Amino acid sequence: MLIYTVMLIPFCTIIMSGFFQRIPNALEEAAMMDGCSRLSALFRVIVPIMLPGIAATFIFAFVQCWNELIMAVLFIDEESVKTIPVAMNAFIKKYDIEWGAMSTATVLSVIPTMLLFAFCQKYLVEGLTQGAVKG
């Protein structure tokens, strides 16, 4: 988990900085004029506006970690902690590929990602369009 975190921090920082730059300072100042502290303004005003960006970044990071193979193959030895891509890699033998088992594992491994996209679709579409427009 530490390796995935270190790999994804630069990516997530770059993605989130685009979303944070779009939020005007006037929103935070107006919340503070209404009696909110800086922390209260952050959680009551800024975070709800940032939710689409956070959701989009989370989904991109999740998919990257879910599909990552190289680091997992290098660092995982135990059978009980193998990730899905590493386990699917075991279906590839020296002279044969177990296509039936590989296809079944592929379909089953896509289900969690599809469910995540289904639950976060509203925020994902809003976050992608919000971060794509400059100005």
Image (cartoon, rainbow, N blue to C red):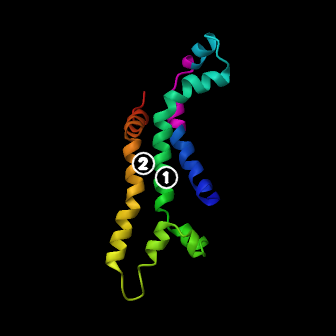
Q: Main secondary structure of the magenta part?
A: helix
Instruction: Report the span colored magenta.
Output: 17-27
**For the residues bearing labels 2 and 1, Cβ distance under 8 angstroms:** yes
Query: Residue most toward the top?
Result: 34
Q: Position of residue 34 (x, y in %)?
A: 61, 10
Residue position for label 1: 62
The residue drawn where x is 49% and y is 52% is 62
Which residue is located at x 40 percent, y 43 percent?
119
In the drawing, does residue 59 fall left or right of residue 35?
left
Look at the picture and state if 66 lies above or below 54. Answer: below
What amino acid does circle 1 point to? Answer: Phe
Q: Quadrant of residue 4?
A: bottom right
Question: Residue 64 location in percent, x, y?
Answer: 48, 56
Secondary element type, mark 1: helix
Decide if residue 125 is in sight here: yes
Q: Residue at x 53, y 30 (%)?
A: 21
Counting from the top left corner in percent of width and height, residue 114 is at 37, 52
Q: Which mark is residue 116?
A: 2
